[in-house]
Image (cartoon, rainbow, N blue to C red):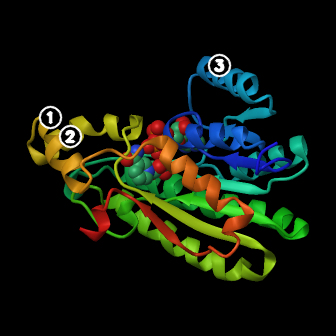
Amino acid sequence: MGILNGKTAVVTGSTSGIGLACARTFAGAGANVVINGMGAPGDIEKERAAIERDFTVRAIYSPADMTKPSEIAELIALGEETFGSVDILVNNAGIQHVSPIEEFPAEKWDAIIAINLSASFHAIRAAVPGMKTRGWGRIVNTASAHSVIASPFKSAYVAAKHGIAGLTKTVALELARSKITCNCISPGYVWTPLVEKQIPNTMAARRMRRDEVINDVLLAAQPTKEFVTVEQVASLALFLCSDDAAQITGANLSMDGGWTVA
Ligand code: NAD
């Protein structure tokens, strides 16, 4: 028995990194979990088997593409049809691209805005009617320290993350009387494939070596001089989904080693 017993959580982008940690943490708290993301099918099957084995809960995988509104609606419908409800929605899928603005590929801009921002709108839109009917819901959006501060060469990412902070506040106000909360978590740097894949682009844009990017850009940003861990983000997401967090809504909770206050 866990604090999410009987609840169903859809976690977008949960085949890797923060989303995978959320899926595991929620499953550990007793939730049914809909896992989503783009990954090698073999890995996803392994992950689902591991979650089922470790936590003896039901987990189902959907390859819904977060750039496609119809597939996002189908993802929510899959959760409702399979488990009877979608009570928790974690909008977490995300991509990143680092490039000077004059060289920033337009298709990267479109994909980042679609996956990191618009997908959350489409998923919330699809999940809210069921949450309203049941009179309970939790929406957690994975934002970023870049929802409040900028860094050079991340124009699309910073724009999308500022957008998700605004969407979070608006949705929180609209749903405040419906016992549905909507919050975002803003991690600092977490060592995941999203960050690792952009090291070469960051080296090029900043004319730095790999170790300089890691130590003088990433770790230097955070006064703790440590990366945030995926488990730490997942623990905060779990708390936001608990009944104890019923009065937290519209918040943008930093977990960034002090980066945004420094
Ligand atoms: P990750 O690369 O480990 O995971 C990203 C997930 O998104 C994967 O499951 C991937 O398959 C999925 N995804 C990508 N494109 C998709 C698409 N079109 N449709 C469906 N799923 C798709 O990255 P992460 O670091 O765990 O990032 C998760 C979230 O956390 C993102 O929103 C990211 O912006 C945010 N974030 C990350 C950091 C960090 O330092 N890693 C910091 C702040 C915020």
Which class describes the residues within 10 Å of circle 2: few (<14), some (14-19), or many (20+)? some
Please state the horizontal and vertical placement of residue 89, each as a whole percent of the image. 69, 55
Q: Is 197 in front, or is 48? A: 48
Residue that mark 3 sits on: 46
Which image quarter holds the N terminus?
top right
- Numbered badge on residue 253: none
Distance (Cα) linking label 2 and label 3? 31 Å
Please state the horizontal and vertical placement of residue 143, each as a whole percent of the image. 47, 60
Say whether residue 92 is visible.
no
Which class describes the residues within 10 Å of circle 3: few (<14), some (14-19), or many (20+)? few
Instruction: Give the residue displayed 18% in from the left and 49% down from the top.
Output: 217
Q: Say how many tags the image has.
A: 3
- Tag 2 near tag 1, CB within 8 Å: yes
Instruction: Give the residue displayed 36% in from the left and 57% down from the top.
Output: 256
Please state the horizontal and vertical placement of residue 79, each as a whole percent of the image. 81, 45
- Tell me: residue 227, above or below residue 246: above
Is 123 left, or right, of 207 in this rendering? right
Which amino acid type is marked by label 1? Asp
Instruction: Give the residue displayed 80% in from the left and 33% down from the top.
Output: 57
- Tell me: residue 197, above or below residue 69: above
Please state the horizontal and vertical placement of residue 69, each as a whole percent of the image. 67, 54
- Tag 2 near tag 3, CB within 8 Å: no
Is 193 left, or right, of 154 in this rendering? right
Mark toward the start of the polypeptide (2 vs 3): 3
Secondary structure at numbered mark 1: helix
Residue that mark 2 sits on: 214
Secondary structure at numbered mark 3: helix
Secondary structure at numbered mark 2: helix
- Numbered badge on residue 211: 1
Q: Is mark 3 within 8 Å of ligand 1?
A: no
Distance (Cα) linking label 3 and label 1? 33 Å
